[in-house]
Amino acid sequence: MSFSEAALRFGRSRNLIGVLARPAKPPPAQRPAVLLLSAGVVHCAGPFGMYVALARTLADRGFVVLRFDLAGIGDSAQPRDARTVQERTIDDVTDAMDYLERSLNVRSFVLGGLCSAADDAHALTNVDARVVGNIMLDGYAYPTVRYRLRRVTAKLTRPSLFARAFARASRSLQRNREATDGLPATQHVPRPFPDGGQFRKEVQNSLKRGVQYLCVFSGGVGYYNYADQFRHFVGVPADDPALSEVYLPGAEHTYPLGMHRQRMVELVSEWVNHRFGAHHPVP
């Protein structure tokens, strides 16, 4: 094994817990460290251990990687104060970057992860110039003309109207039964997205200052349905290498299947190595 792992406690309140993976040979000073942020309320191993696999793969390629729990998640305690969740998240990630900067002299960072982790990485990019890269796994994406056309086409090619009506009636009956049993029906509620115009402007500004983006979308989210949807919405030319976008329609949101999880880990590690490896210094 060409890397080591160690548990850490850090943060202004000494409440944050994480695992630091370090290559056996110290990386070049200009190489950024990678921070894998909490995916929802999942422990820093990530859904189905995806962060463990990704951190070890990147460390084996010569990158320092910190995967840690935000305050109130996993092993990290939540301090009692008046900060909002967003304020506390920004402080937690800033503390992680400050720690690595002090202890390992790391001066730049690639942030990201799955779902809310991608959202948090985007927020940090807007407030901290040390962020040079974003790994967005099922991050924000917005409808385009092509997205809407594909949605309409998909509806027109579904089973007959009778079959759809029968399915709706069956679901209604099931909801009534669940309510009668005291078990309310559940409905998927997507996380809140920022205003699309503001998001577009923020990404464009980040790209102008040299931030590199990797956007990977699974087939498990309903707001994305074709490759390059993110690029088209943000307005990034197809030949702009600062934005890489990949669509994995067969994969589910949390990558429960090993073959899909392995493919995602390979994609991310190849991108990080290509963009920030020894022969590709930070712009």
Image: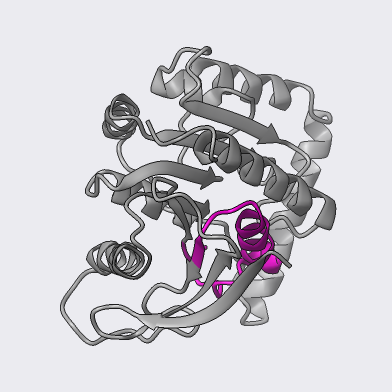
Q: Could you say which is closer to the camera, residue 191 or residue 214? A: 214
Bounds of the magenta span?
A: 37-66
Can you give x and y, in whole percent of width and height, for residue 239 in the image? 52, 12
Q: Residue at x 44, y 43 (%)?
A: 134
Using the rendered view, name the quadrant where residue 164 is placed: top right
Does residue 140 lie above or below 174 as drawn? above
Check the image and tell me how it is coloured. Answer: one colour
Which quadrant of the figure contains the N terminus?
A: bottom right
The answer to which quarter of the image holds residue 185 is: bottom right
Q: Is residue 175 visible?
A: no
Residue beneath the point at 78% across and 30% down: 161
Q: Quadrant of the C terminus?
A: top left
Which residue reaches farthest left?
82
- Residue nearest the viewer, comparing 167 with 265: 265
Q: Verify whether residue 41 appears in magenta.
A: yes
Name which residue lies at 25% across and 67% down: 91
Q: Is residue 131 above or below residue 106?
A: above
Q: Is residue 242 magenta?
A: no
